[in-house]
Amino acid sequence: MAVVGDLALMGTKISPNKLVGNLEKRVFGFPVLLSSRFVFSHGRKLDVSKSRTAIRAVMQVEKIHSTSELNEGCLGFDVVSEREVKEKGFLGLRKTKLVCTIGPASSSLDELEKLAIAGMNVARLNMCHNTREWQQDVIRKIKKLNQEKGYSVAVMMDTEGNQIQVVDHGSSSSVKAEEDSIWYVTTEKFEGSRPFTIQANYEDFAEGVNPGDEIVIDGGMATFEVIERAGNDLRCKCTDSGLLLPRAKLSFWRDGKILGRDYDLPTLSAKDWSDIAFGISEDIDFIAVSFVKDADAIKHLKDYLTTKSPKAIKVLAKIESLESLRRLEEIVEASDGIMIARGDLGVEIPLEQIPSVQQDITYVCRQLNKPVIVASQLLESMVEYPTPTRAEVADVSEAVRQYADALMLSGESAIGSYGMKALSVLRTTSTRMEQSCREENRQTSLHQRKLGVSLPDQIAEQICNCAVEMADNLGVDAIFVYTRHGKMASLLSRNRPNPPIFAFTNDNSTRMALNLQWGVTPLLTDLSDDMEGNVKKTVELIKGKGGMIKKEDAILVVSDIIPISTAQTIFQSIQVMTIS
Ligand SMILES: Nc1ncnc2c1ncn2[C@@H]1O[C@H](COP(=O)(O)OP(=O)(O)O)[C@@H](O)[C@H]1O
Ligand SMILES: C=C(OP(=O)(O)O)C(=O)O
């Protein structure tokens, strides 16, 4: 089952027969039910009486035999994962998820299908651009591909937000600002372009800005010094020449420090709310909220979605401002995931701080069990060129090494001529780095120990931590998890196991949400309350696919499905089975 390269690395892989023999001693006699009221876990008191959950800590090792009556039903394997498992084996599956921004270069049915085949897990629509009709057309094409061709691409809407520090020079391409040239930044509205004039998109944008302050464009593309203020307008001199792109972002600096500016605007604008209503009606899967300042906007949106959306749309917070960094933990806790929007973040903080901030955000997200996307300029040069720079490949590798859940393409796939190639660079680079992380993990399991006891549901957290430790130590071929809302799957993913996680769910929104979760291949299937039946049925269905699972493969199974016989109690279990 494993690819040759992986097998060669699997120094600790044991044969399934040895597995049964080895485990028998450790397994039987393990405590079966927690009977005491309190259990102490890493110093934190756990009130078991308050939990509806019983831990059936039976670590079963069993052999699964064919049962023909379970061959009915179907397994919602998407065609891309199915092909990947058949070609590369369980251990060859890519773990890092890929997000592509869709734009004019990638919006045809043909291009969208090519991206889906090449591994796009989530398609992102930036609501700053294009018309409602265009966006609707793209979303419907993706849904059509999913339904008719068996892909499983989730749709993410990225809100425009109250983005106020934006200037435009009225031309569709970039304009060069030469050193010492004099420019006007005005709030006056006019059509087209005027020489040496850029329009600010917010009336009070010059409020609090003094002569001598600096205007930095797009985090350093060009720099101006403010010479004078005339009403709402600014007269400036270019001190560092560079390109002004359409919709360039700017920041104000004084004495080497950024000027924090509170415009007191709500995070979600009227247009955002209208876009969100549209997104709900088009059955989208994720909403990424721009310019999040605190947890309130996220909580508010989630409450709104609970009442307005028939399905669970996941809300991602974009971290792209100083304010969001200051309140990182509360924002991560409130949201369903995070996007590190390095483009705007690089306008607000010095560029040299981006790598360490990215590492910190990724770490916090993993601790709090929220998926994290690293976004912007990963392969920026590929908007124009067919190969990436070596530094870009190193940046992508570093994000994978930090165990980000997902990587995102922006202009590369939206407007670039080499979107497909860029996606393929992300795919091959992440697969390579994942492989060397696996090698490293075999020598040290430090990455797991770093995860503290930090989540409210300690039982689920501990079950999943232990399950991954077992899976890695035993060198099993795959982890199966049965999950309705995706929680157990995400807790397993949080531990970044070596084997892939197959998450069986009967809820399509869970399946789509898991598209952003590191190492998880979500599968849509019927689930019953009979856990043993679910395991047997899904194994049979996978066997039925042919060429995926083979005799003597070892599978670790985690479940928390309510069994039929004791409807009030959720049994959480870890089992290890070998395929016969
Ligand atoms: N739907 C679209 N229609 C037209 N152009 C788009 C679209 N989406 C993205 N783009 C282009 O791709 C570039 C990168 O996308 P993105 O990072 O989402 O936007 P931005 O740079 O505005 O934050 C944008 O500057 C824009 O030129
Ligand atoms: C992803 C980002 O957001 P947007 O494309 O909306 O600017 C970013 O700033 O990096």
Image (cartoon, rainbow, N blue to C red):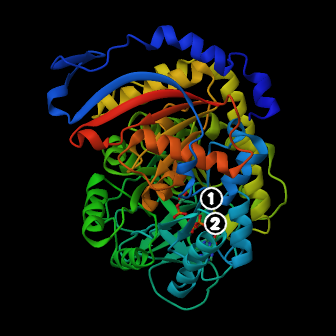
Front residue (pair 343, 137): 137
Amino acid under disc 1: Asp
Mark 1 lies on a secondary structure that is loop
Front residue (pair 200, 450): 450
Q: Where is residue 22 in the image (x, y as percent from the top left)?
A: 57, 10
Mark 2 lies on a secondary structure that is loop
Q: Residue 179 carries which label?
A: none
Q: In which quarter of the image is residue 57?
A: top left
| Residue for badge 1 | 78
Label 1 packing within 10 angstroms: few (<14), some (14-19), many (20+): some
Q: Separation of disc 1 and disc 2 at Cα?
A: 5 Å
Label 2 packing within 10 angstroms: few (<14), some (14-19), many (20+): some
380 sits to left or right of 360: right
Q: Does the rendering let one see residue 329?
A: yes
Q: Are marks 1 and 2 in contact (CB under 8 Å)?
A: yes
Q: Which mark is residue 150?
A: 2
Q: Which residue appears at 57% of the width and 42% of the height?
A: 539
Q: In which quarter of the image is residue 95?
A: top right
Q: Position of residue 311 (x, y in %)?
A: 36, 66
- Pick out the residue farthest to the bottom: 191
* The C terminus: image quadrant: top right
Q: Which residue appears at 31% of the width and 19% of the height?
A: 32
Q: Position of residue 257 (x, y in %)?
A: 45, 46
